[in-house]
Structure formats: C-alpha cells, structure tokens
Image (spheres, rainbow, N blue to C red):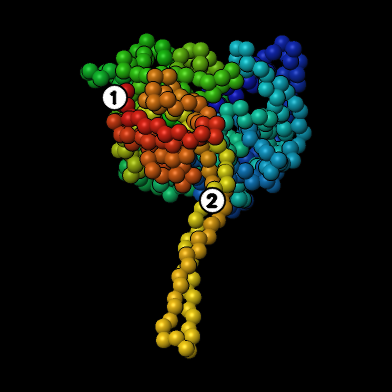
Amino acid sequence: MNILKLYIYILILNYFFDKKNFLFLLILVALSTSLQSQSKFGFFGENQKEQSVRFNLINNLVVIPMEVNGKQLSFILDTGVNKTILFNLSQNDSIGLNDVRRVALQGLGKGKSMDALISDNNTLKIKDFVGENQEIYVLLKDKFDVSGKMGMTIHGIVGYKLFKDAVVHINYITRRVHFYNPKFFKYKKCRKCETFPLQFYRNKPYINAKIQLDTIGNKLTDVKLLIDSGGSESVWLFENSKEEIQTPIRHFRDVLGEGISGTIYGKRSRIKQISIGSFDIKEPTVSFLDSTSTFYARQFKERNGSIGGNILKRFKIWVDYNNKKITLKKSGSFRGGFEYNMSGLDVVYNGKVLVKEKAGTTFSDSYSSNSSQTSTNKTISLVSSYTYKFKPSYKVKHVLENSPAALAGIQEGDIILNINGTKAHQLTLKEILGKFQSGHNNKIRLYVDRSGVEMKFQFRLVKKI
C-alpha cells in the first residue's frame, strides 16, 4: 500500500511540474486557494459531539464506508495522504462527479501516462459527518490492483480531510472509528496512555522514535517517521537517510508493490527494536527502500521512513491534528509477534467463480403392502441435491525468484484450488496469507489450475530473517 501512494504522489507531482502545464498550474493554485476557503469536512451540528463508524481491518488497514455524492463506497483511512483519491470505479459503482477536468499523469521512467480526473465540489459523508466542496483525484484504472491485494473491493483512500477537523479515535480491537468534535472533546485521565507531539509536513503527521538496528550492543538511532495508517507493513526505513540506516546483513529481496512501470522490489529484514517513548516493540519486520524508489517521499529531508498498520494496530490511538499530538495506549495485541510471507508467493483476489456444492442428502422411504402377502417391502433411495454459489477465487500474481514456491515449480497466473486440504474458495485472502506465515519448515500443499490442467505442488516454508 505504501508503494501505491508513493507513485500516485509522483504522478501528481510530475503532472504539475511539466513545463507545458505551468500556466495551468497557476490557474489550479488560484482555484485551490478559493476552494480551500470554502471546503469543509467534519461539520458537526451545533450540539453534535461525535460520530462513529465500524470498519473492516484488512491487511492491517482500516477500511471505512463513505458516501461520495450519495454513493456508498469503501475507503482506506490513511493518515499518510493529504488528498482524497478514487482509483477503482466500475459501472456498478458509478457516481456523479462534479466539475471534472481530465489530465494525463506521467509516471517514473518509461511508464505510459495514466488518464486521471480532478473533480471539485463533491460531497463526502460518513453518517452525519459531512464534507462539502471536496476535491477528489480519480485514477481511471486501478493499475495497482489494490482490491486484489485486499480481497475485497476498495474504491479509494481518504486521510487529511477526515482528520483535520476532529479528534479521531481508532480502536483496532472493537473495529470502530470515533470522530469527536474538538469543541466538546475532553481527554480522560489514562495512566497507561502516552501522548507525543506531531510535526506536520504537507499535512502529514510525523513522530520521533528510536530504532535499534544492531543486534550486538544497545545503540539507538533517532528517526523521524511518518505515521502511516494506510501502510500495511510494520516499518519502512529509507536506506542511507542517515549514516546508520543500512540494511542488515540478514535480509532478502521481495516484492513490495506495484508502480507505474511495473513491479517494485525491495529488501526485507528485521531489526532488534523500535521505541516510541516508553513503548519498546521487539524485533519488528522492516522493509528497506533505496533512494530511487523513495525519491518523492524523501522530499521532506528529515524523514527516515514510516510506521505502518502492523505497529499501529497494537495500540488504541487518538489522533489530534488541531493540537498536533497523538495519544497511544497499548492494546491486548501489543506483544504479538511479527511474521512475514515465507513462501515467495504473491497471491491476489481473482474475482468470483461459480462453485457447485452438495446441499445434503434426502432419505426417501417407500412402503408397499399387499393384503395377500405377509411380508412388507421397504426401499430407501438417496437423493443428492446441489447448489451453485459464487465464491472467491485467488491467483498467483508473482513468484519470488529462488523462493520455496518457485523451486517447487509454481508459476505466475496459477489459480489456487486447494491449500493443505482446504478448498481455496472456503478461505479468505487473509487466511491464505496466514498459512504462508505459519512457521519455518511448515509444509504447504497446493493444488492449482494452470490453463485448465490441475497440478499438485508441495514445499516447506523457509525463514530467512
């Protein structure tokens, strides 16, 4: 998810700084200044104190329902973005967008330009929590396949617009987000809570933390990290953003996401500790990205990386943009371990397929009697009935070179039919990925469909870090 946002930002940046569009940029600046004065989100009624909504927690990300111009869609709630972005609209999800203008956004390298829209004067709504005159960026193709990676339809990302006018409490245990009116909100005494100042750059919140990279000794390195609720991983670190920030010897190359020009690879490793105030988080997994992959993200020179959802979900969180602070309280999942995909398979949701299922067995009892006969005859027939239902399908999007799955012979495009004796359509994407994190040397048995031919493979998970 971090890679998705990174490349969306690069697209927007490259578009606006194209010389041919410089005049248009000046017009947009004037328009955005005007719109900013009119735009509002978090309009509470005169005596309205709060609004809350349940969310789905998928791949450590908070997915909330939000209406766009009266149409309910699914959005990732993301502290790491300052734009509202739509990237997955089908005919069934069609909405009326206001004041639309088309732009062509150019990505990195030799990637083709991407068609996009900028739409003004839209209404966003979560129950009674309403924002008017909202600007939305619309990517016309979901090139990043976010829905496939999440296992459900995701329409977009929303962040700053929701956070700027409310105190936002995210409870990962109860799966509920509360939006509090700052005019009425009062912090309760909390002995186990800790409050930290936030620094903002381009409307995104940063926090100071310490990391221990060295497995020998106790040296801690001060870092400034983006609080990124829209990133599913634990920690991102930007290689060489400080002299001490180098990839540990024990690491491996892995698929981190999709960019405009193709698949993005990086290094995965594990560090000894990350400390946020008095909260010491032991042995989190970390992704290291080089300067090329993080060019735009490094525009804030003080930034050394990000804290993602796999860390944040271990706390109860109160985010207060107005007072530039965040309050954390450990939850029951604080001491949970950090695992990663040890198979080498990048599996994504592949839509729904029609599955034939046996509904049950009916016993039919036929009794016949004849007065001239002393015996009775009974016959029992078994009648099977079937139902046809649409069930989820999953496919292999990438296979990491020299990984256990690659060495076993699994290929990109294989449709997964069965995992360790369970039919794939009976599992969620989260459950499938959980099997790939189940433990070193655990055996994985897969049945796949490859171009209409059913094939069987097996391999053992290998822990590299």
Query: For the point 60% across and 12% down, which residue is it?
Result: 109
Residue position for label 2: 356
Q: Tell me if I can see residue 107 in this picture.
A: yes
Indicate the position of residue 11 as horizontal and vertical percent values.
63, 20
In terms of depth relative to the viewer, which is nearer, 355 or 84? 355
Query: Of the residues tagged 2 and 1, which is closer to the observer?
Result: 2
Residue 275 drawn above or below residue 44: above
Residue position for label 1: 272
The span from disc 2 to disc 1 (Cα, nearest Å) is 49 Å
Counting the numbered discs, the total is 2
In terms of depth relative to the viewer, which is nearer, 297 or 403? 403
Query: For the point 47% across and 65% down, which residue is it?
Result: 382
Residue 317 drawn above or below residue 374: above
Indicate the position of residue 416 as horizontal and vertical percent values.
48, 36
Q: On the image, which quarter does residue 144 sit in?
A: top right
Local SS, label 2: strand
Query: For the point 48% across and 79% down, which residue is it?
Result: 367
412 with respect to 235 (left or right): right
In terms of depth relative to the viewer, which is nearer, 333 or 418? 418
Which of disc 1 and disc 2 is earlier in sequence? 1
Q: Which class describes the residues within 10 Å of circle 2: few (<14), some (14-19), or many (20+)?
A: few
Q: Residue furthest bottom?
A: 371
Q: Which class describes the residues within 10 Å of circle 1: few (<14), some (14-19), or many (20+)?
A: some
Q: On the image, which quarter does residue 465 sit in?
A: top left
Residues marked 2 and 1 touching at CB (< 8 Å): no
162 with respect to 28 (left or right): left
Indicate the position of residue 120 as horizontal and vertical percent values.
72, 33
Please, what is the three-letter code of the amino acid marked with disc 1?
Answer: Lys
Local SS, label 1: loop
Please, what is the three-letter code of the amino acid marked with disc 2?
Answer: Lys
